[in-house]
Image: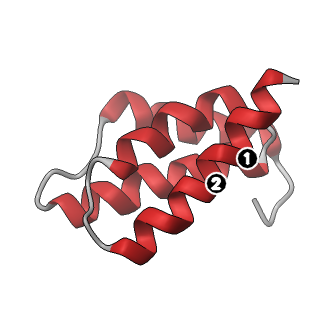
Amino acid sequence: MNADNRKKVLGAARNAVKSGADRRSELLEYFWHRSLGDICLQLGEVRDAIPLLKMALTKTTIEGYLKDTRVKLAGAESQAKN
């Protein structure tokens, strides 16, 4: 992202999605989905971010993480409708 190479970052994110999440713990899965969702949002790929953020919500019970992810998801869904 810092190198300002949108195409390369998006390609890496999509490859990561194809590879799948680290399944050693649900918390790692949460951060994996959430981080990729954040990257998609930063790149303006809102429709790609939505399923990642939804999956992140299923991987944690920590209220702060749930709240923050729900806010991001709501924003992404709102953008996707426009």
Colour convention:
secondary structure
> Are circles 2 and 1 on residues that touch, CB within 8 Å?
yes
User: Residue 48, image x and y in percent?
Assistant: 61, 29
Q: CA distance from mark 2 to mark 1?
A: 5 Å
- Residue at (11%, 59%) from the top-left corner? 24
Classify residue 64 as left or right of residue 76. Answer: left
Local secondary structure at mark 1: helix
Look at label 2 and name its amino acid: Lys
**Percent position of residue 67, x then y:** 50, 66
Q: Residues within 10 Å of mark 2 (few under 14, many from 20)?
A: some
Which residue appears farthest toward the left when viewing the image? 24
The quadrant of the image that shows the C terminus is top right
Counting every numbered tag in the picture gives 2
Looking at the picture, tell me which residue is in the foreground, 26 or 24: 26
Question: What residue would you read off at disc 1?
Answer: 75
Residue 46 lies, in percent from the top left, at 72, 34
Type of amino acid under label 1: Gly
Residue drawn at point x = 47 percent, y = 55 percent: 34
Image position of 34 (left or right of 76): left
Quarter of the image where the N terminus is located: bottom right
Q: Is residue 45 visible in this depiction of the protein?
A: no
- Callout 1: few (<14), some (14-19), or many (20+) C-alpha neighbours within 10 Å? some
- Along the line of sight, which residue is nearer the eye, 63 or 19? 63
Locate residue 61 relative to residue 77 in the image: left or right: left
Dividing the picture into quadrants, the one containing residue 3 is: bottom right
- Helix, strand or loop under label 2: helix
Q: What residue is shown at x 81% (from left), y 39% (from top)?
A: 44
Q: Is residue 32 visible?
A: yes
Reading the image, the residue beneath label 2 is 72
Residue drawn at 38 percent across, 55 percent down: 32
